[in-house]
Amino acid sequence: MSQTGQTSIPVSTDIFCRVIDNFGDAGVMWRLARALTDEGHSVRLIIDELETLTQLTGGLKNGATLKKRYGIDVFQWESAWDEGSCPMEPASFVIEGFGCRLPMDYERKMARKTEPPLWVNVDYFSAEDWVDDFHLQPSIHPIYGLKKYFYFPGVSPKSGALIIEKNYLKQERDWKSQHTRTEPIKLFFFAYPYGPIQDLALALSEVSRPLEVRCAATQAGQELYRCIEKLNKSHLKATLLPFVSQEEFDHFLWDCDLAFIRGEDSAARAMIAGVPFVWHIYHQDDNAHQIKLRALETKMSDCFSDNNLFSLWCAFQEGFNDGLIQQDALNALIAQVEALRQCSMAWREKIHANGSLAQKLSEMAKKTLK
């Protein structure tokens, strides 16, 4: 309630998303849509591949069902809108996902409004230092003069932070109170298919401690599952997991000791959960992915009290991204998995201290549009 006793009006918010990287782009924008709804926004998600969203929501297809469960209006982004007429009237707050470029007619309508919308491009995550300098920098539209801000998710206090749901810690506590971690050591595997999967299976078979490898239902996960099954080692077991909704993905992370993760959203979730991880980062030209990887490692270095453990973690992770398996490093990481978890929990504290990306965006919108 406001001081005058009237209920505050929700900020109308449009989020535009093109599905480029499998579930990655859709996953981040859907998570953001849910988080902004929790912040009190009236959200419309405009996405060009509804089928991808259907899988992320556990099979929900009907727009009315999505609205009832999540409070979000979901619309198909029609290709005809890109050059032709777009029937949607702009919201007060417009989010462009990963530079997807809004429909031209929608941009024209934004420019015609007496009070132009707040326009923000939520960009890709990076731990590189330049993020702090470019975060929230404006860009002026060459035709309409509209101002667009570039919002960079990151891991430093000056960045845009990561999406942390308001009820995340409560959900985690509730789930863990009903699930006790037991032996053997559990590995969660969610990586790209071009990784050294067969070599990883062989390396895991050489680890002395009993392992249970839980493979995500992806091409890479299925391949690792088959490789482990063929090895038929008594101390190494594999399970092929079903595809789950975005909400359930966190459960797999909370229930593992070490996670092989890919992409941005899963990396963010592992960091938020405080789970030790090996980040299989999407390969880019000129080895740019290794630069991004090492930037994150550098940011996390202070959370490692054991420099040798930090070096082993970096060596294995960087090697994995180059298609190599360093057996000694893997042995050490699994042997010291509890120490590794302490480092990851220290890093988690820093991540949570930065606040939530959705909350920061909401505060920006409400301040700008008041």
Image (cartoon, rainbow, N blue to C red):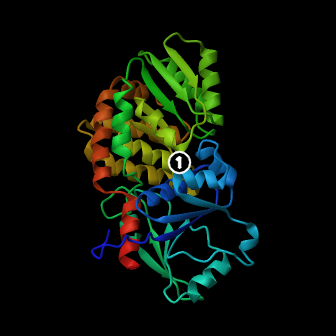
Percent position of residue 306, x then y:
25, 35
Residue 284 in sight from this viewpoint: no
Image height of 172 relative to 223, above or below: below
Residue 157, placed above or below residue 365: above
224 to 304, vertically: above or below: above
Quarter-wise, where is residue 254 in the image? top left
Q: Quadrant of the N terminus?
A: bottom left
- Residue 173 location (% of width, % of height): 33, 36
Q: Is residue 118 above or below residue 233?
A: below
What is the secondary structure assignment of the residue under circle 1?
helix
Viewer-nearest residue: 342 or 62: 62
Residue 212 picture location, percent across and down = 49, 21
Q: Residue 176 lies in what quarter of the image?
A: top left
Q: Horizontal placement of 324 versus 156: left or right?
A: right
262, 288: nearer the viewer = 262
Q: Is residue 59 visible?
A: yes
Q: Can you name the residue that lies furthest to the front here?
A: 5
